[in-house]
């Protein structure tokens, strides 16, 4: 695979061998089942050429290399349940064997290649920060902007690199030129940081917030569209849409709502923190005028990386959150005047994109959807167990919410961790109660079997 041999070239011949960065364990991957050996035999791992290739490539990445070649012949929906293949994806991570991390929705771990790129660039920067950080490492920002734009399906001149979704979206919330009495439609199911930012504008500027509160989960897109459009009035200037509701994983029909908003000259802000790189789409597909996301969630970039999208014709009238030389410029870079920041974290985003491309967007979506439905299908008929997420395609993907009647979410969360070392997060928000379960591509069905056992014991009073 190209990812294992690519060099990251920087100015002045400073280079980083990213292929070598992803290996630091020279141990042979344990072949625990005949089926896994059979899967790799199909890919030719045990051929003479495979043995020769082993000289310069570590065992785990060599196996993944061949597994990816074999996977090219398998449709994504079928590959989703091929545990042998996903076993080798797991080896590209350094996740703890001591706990089962099912809270990837909060912040996801990065694969080895991203971690080691950050470490290497951090070391380079510290050799002479003002030189290597600004004159060398930061020269990779424009190529990175282009790569993010390719992933997002938009122009490079519409992408600003930020630290997280909150920073990106608050740039929009505080930068829009709204006047006293202007109305903004948003949901009580939105993320608290965004809600609080709008409340601050309400307090400071006298705008009016109009709240909707959809009943979730829902498998009725017409209902979800109407609950927003019924709130629109001639005074509505902006609608904020959370693409994937972080509490339970509900996917909203953002494009349909956005189209209805645009017909009324209402601008659309999309919170894509939990959708970007979880399943494939382009930002223009959403109908967003403004879009913010965290890249340390589903793209698995380094912690503290995010992205802002502003439609090209909207840039000039949006004020930056941090002062820029010309705040009314139509240059997207005006939103990046945040002072000295960790450029080594930014540049590692490129390796996260490569890793994402290596797996494939369709494969990732199908695997995450499969994992969510795998555990949910096993607990849905248990006494007292209540599910808060749809199992149908298009209404949910990776995130799932589960609760037990008569018990607090915090009790279930504590039980799962103390008794089974399964890490989840409790949810009690606007009628939604349970623990949120968010697996990732490194999660195995064996991990989820432990989760299912824990939920069953808790529901039966085994605590």
Image (tube, rainbow, N blue to C red):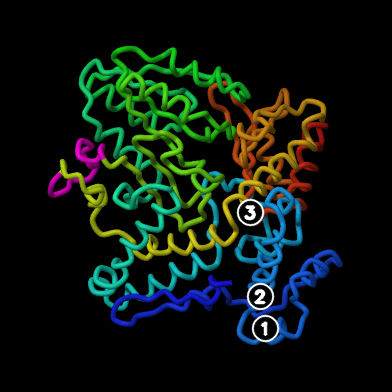
Q: CA distance from mark 1 to mark 2?
A: 7 Å
Tag 2 residue = 62
Q: CA distance from mark 3 to mark 1?
A: 25 Å
- Residue 394 is left or right of residue 51, and the answer is left
Tell me if residue 463 can be seen. no
Q: Are marks 3 and 1 in contact (CB under 8 Å)?
A: no
The front one of 46 and 391 is 46
Instruction: Characterize the local packing of mark 1: few (<14), some (14-19) or many (20 or more) Cα atoms within 10 angstroms.
Output: some
Question: Which residues are the magenta region?
Answer: 313-326
Return the x and y of residue 301 as percentages of the image width and height.
47, 57
- Residue 174 is left or right of residue 446, and the answer is left
| Residue 210 vertical placement versus 297 (above, below) | above
Q: Which mark is residue 65?
A: none
Tag 3 residue = 441
Q: Earlier in the sequence, mark 2 or mark 3?
A: 2
Tag 1 residue = 54
């Amino acid at each position: 695979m190209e990812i294992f041999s690519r060099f990251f070239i920087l100015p002045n011949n400073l280079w980083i061998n990213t292929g070598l960065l992803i290996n630091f364990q020279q141990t042979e991957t344990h072949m625990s089942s005949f089926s896994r050996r059979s899967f790799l035999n199909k890919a030719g791992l045990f051929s003479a050429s495979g043995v020769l290739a082993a000289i310069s490539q570590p065992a785990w990445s060599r196996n993944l290399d061949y597994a990816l070649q074999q996977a090219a012949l398998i449709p994504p929906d079928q590959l989703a349940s091929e545990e042998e293949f996903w076993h080798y994806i797991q080896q590209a991570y350094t996740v703890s064997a001591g706990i089962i991390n099912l809270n990837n929705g909060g912040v996801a771990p990065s694969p080895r290649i991203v971690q080691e790129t950050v470490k290497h660039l951090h070391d380079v920067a510290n050799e002479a920060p003002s030189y290597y950080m600004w004159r060398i490492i930061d020269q990779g920002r424009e190529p990175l902007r282009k790569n993010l734009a390719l992933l997002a399906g938009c122009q490079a001149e519409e992408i600003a690199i930020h630290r997280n979704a909150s920073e990106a979206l608050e740039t929009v919330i505080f930068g829009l030129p709204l006047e006293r009495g202007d109305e903004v439609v948003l949901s009580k199911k939105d993320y608290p940081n965004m809600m609080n930012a709008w409340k601050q504008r309400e307090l400071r500027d006298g705008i009016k917030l109009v709240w909707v509160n959809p009943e979730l989960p829902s498998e009725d897109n017409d209902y979800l569209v109407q609950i927003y459009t019924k709130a629109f009035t001639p005074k509505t200037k902006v609608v904020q849409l959370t693409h994937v509701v972080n509490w339970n994983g509900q996917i909203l029909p953002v494009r349909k709502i956005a189209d209805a908003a645009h017909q009324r000259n209402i601008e659309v802000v999309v919170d894509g923190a939990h959708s970007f790189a979880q399943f494939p789409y382009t930002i223009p597909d959403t109908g967003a005028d403004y879009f913010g996301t965290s890249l340390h969630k589903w793209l698995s970039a380094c912690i503290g990386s995010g992205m802002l999208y502003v439609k090209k014709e909207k840039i000039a009238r949006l004020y930056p959150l941090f002062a820029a030389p010309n705040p009314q410029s139509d240059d997207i870079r005006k939103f990046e005047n945040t002072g000295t920041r960790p450029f080594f974290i930014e540049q590692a985003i490129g390796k996260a994109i490569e890793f994402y491309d290596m797996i494939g967007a369709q494969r990732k979506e199908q695997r995450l959807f499969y994992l969510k439905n795998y555990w949910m299908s096993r607990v849905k008929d248990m006494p007292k167990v209540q599910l808060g997420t749809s199992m149908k395609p298009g209404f949910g993907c990776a995130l799932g919410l589960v609760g037990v009647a008569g018990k607090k979410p915090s009790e279930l969360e504590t039980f799962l961790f103390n008794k089974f070392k399964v890490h989840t997060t409790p949810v009690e928000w606007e009628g939604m109660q349970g623990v949120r379960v968010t697996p990732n591509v490194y999660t195995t069905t064996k991990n989820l079997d432990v989760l299912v056992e824990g939920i069953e014991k808790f529901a039966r009073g085994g605590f």
